Image: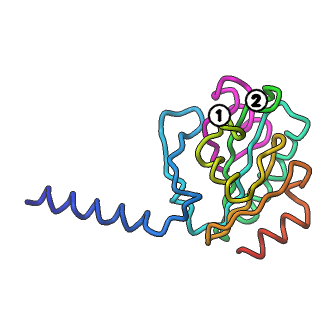
Amino acid sequence: MKKTLITLVIFYLSGSLLANCPEVLDHEVRLLDSKETESLCQYKNKVILAVNVASRCGYTPQYTGLQNLYKELKDEDFVILAFPSRDFLWQEFSDESDIKEFCSTEYGVTFPMFATSPVKGRNANNFYKELIKETGIEPGWNFHKYLIGRDGKVSSFNTKVEPNSSELISSIKSLL
């Protein structure tokens, strides 16, 4: 009886935690260099900046701006979710442990990073397929940014929009 009650409580709590998850976030994704997965629904009450990243790209220095932005705003219910991809001239390491080490050592990245995956075309991961569907815009290169409000509405910023640009920062702050 006690075991059944505990199971029911866990089932109820897990359902209520995931209730009202915006469709765009209703995905399980694998963490970088891990077998562990997590639901993006856990970020449903945050403003999210999803970025497809690469370690060997001319835009890689944007990691500095992304980390600074995350550090500055994370206590205001803001999070950056990074998705390494090899879609653009294989500018990402093929070994996820190399990606993790590079981002930590070179840029001090502390925001969540997920498994290397495609972010464009029919092979795009399901989260990115949803972002593309919501905006009608597919990433054209590394460091394309999608801003997701608490309501699940998505806007898109191309690669050239720097993390510290007034355009991006004002859009983020308007959602916080």
Q: Position of residue 16 (x, y in %)?
A: 38, 68
The image quarter containing residue 58 is: top right
Quarter of the image with the C terminus is: bottom right
When the figure is inspected, residue 107 is found, relative to residue 13, above or below; the finding is above
Q: Position of residue 92 (x, y in %)?
A: 76, 29
Residue 4 colored in magenta in the image: no
**As drawn, is 28 to the left or to the right of 77?**
left
In percent of the image, x 20 and y 60: which residue is there? 6
In percent of the image, x 84 and y 71: which residue is there? 170
The image quarter containing residue 122 is: top right
Q: Position of residue 40 (x, y in %)?
A: 54, 54
**As drawn, is 21 to the left or to the right of 80?**
left
When the figure is inspected, residue 22 is found, relative to residue 161, above or below; the finding is below
Q: Element under label 2? A: loop
Write down the region rendered in magenta: 92-115
Residue wearing tag 2:
92
Q: Residues within 10 Å of mark 2 (few under 14, many from 20)?
A: many
Asked if the residues shown at circle 2 and circle 1 are in contact, with their CB atoms under 8 angstroms apart, the answer is yes
Residue wearing tag 1:
116
Mark 2–mark 1 distance (CA, rounded to whole Å): 8 Å
**As drawn, is 91 to the left or to the right of 119?**
right
Q: Residues within 10 Å of mark 1 (few under 14, many from 20)?
A: many
The image quarter containing residue 45 is: bottom right
Residue type pointed to by label 1: Thr
